[in-house]
Amino acid sequence: MDALVTNRGPLSRVLNLASNKSIGQGCAVKRIPIPTISAHQILVKVHAVALNPIDFISIDILAPRGSIIGCDYAGSVAPVGERALGQWKVGDRVAGFVYGGLYKDRGSFCRYLKVDADLAWRVPAGLSDGEAASYGVSAATAMLALTVYLGLPSLYEPPASASPNMLKDRSEGGGAILIYAGSTTVGLFAIQLARKIGYTVVTTASPHSFELVKQYGADSVFDYHSPTAAQDIIRSFPCITQALDCISKGPSTEFCARVMARNGGKVVTLLDQGKSKVEGVTYEYLVCFTMFGEKFAWFPPVGPAFPVVASRREALAGFYANLPSLVGYVKPPPLLVLGTGFEKILEGLDELRAGKVSGRKLIVKLE
């Protein structure tokens, strides 16, 4: 089969990391064997993929030579392992995400991929392949940040005290959450999930994205360019103790910490921001690939290693088992379909590298 495979050696990756630049393309379409599934896996024929910043970060820095790139996918079930969970049948529509950029036999930018059967979700009628592919890394990251890292109730296991008036009842107390950069795809999913659970959602965005985040359920939005934005949030929502930073660069995490300086709390970050300098506020770094229940490392043996955390895998399996019933009120982000084929994937990754994509998810069809 055809697949988009990395070709950088360690020196090239280190130079990219040191220079904060991408030297050369770093990957190419290559013919490789169709992966062999285990008894607990399904093989997926890929119809569409969604692009994420982690894809080009893997190509430029993280991925060892020979790794298949790509995380988000939607397609149809091909062979099914004899002990695969989920009652999958050949031809069923399926979507999810895999850890692209680490393995030679696993990644979504290819014709076929293998996935643990309980870590994929059944795509309901009425949802396009592109829309289904967009519920990959971004949706799962938002879910993990809210329910596991911040301890919010699960969407499909509402608290006993939940009521239709919960949102209104909690808006003056501990029921407000800050989602920094709400117009990102992680932010849009997090806004919807937190709102559906019953939290008042406070977010930041550029003024041109205000209407977008409100359409996805944000209760209040503040311009993060404003020098008084943090104080404005504190005045309106003085009890915030939980935040998700969907940018995790520059001053974004410190901004979240300042909002919580009075009460303390936790900021979940998507890039490692070190330790908080604000007393009572902690940072916790989320790596979405820990949801697969397998240990891995970056730049071994000198880079960071990530152990198995069973609760995170369980969270992803539960989320995807229930996602078909949730898509009616957790909608996909705005999409931009670039076209068909691997060249379109490379074009989209360059757009992401250049920071030209905002408020939309790039989709490429593979057939």
Image: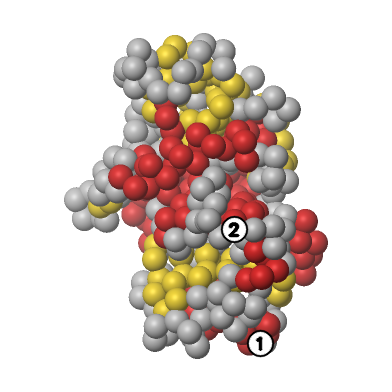
Q: Residue 133 at x, y = what percent? A: 60, 34
Above or below residue 230? Residue 358 is above
Which residue: 27% across, 46% down?
308
Give the camera-side residue of 117 and 51: 117
Which residue: 48% across, 18% down?
88
Give the camera-side residue of 144 and 355: 144
Residue that label 2 marks: 162
Secondary element under disc 1, as helix, strand or loop, is helix
Q: Amino acid at mark 2?
A: Ala
Q: Residue 197 at x, y = what percent? A: 59, 56
Which residue: 48% across, 31% down?
120
Q: Is residue 202 left or right of residue 138?
A: right
Above or below residue 188? Residue 229 is below
Above or below residue 316? Residue 276 is below
Residue that label 1 marks: 235
Report if the CB atoms under discs 1 and 2 are less than 8 Å apart.
no
Secondary element under disc 2, as helix, strand or loop, is loop
Q: Amino acid at mark 1?
A: Arg
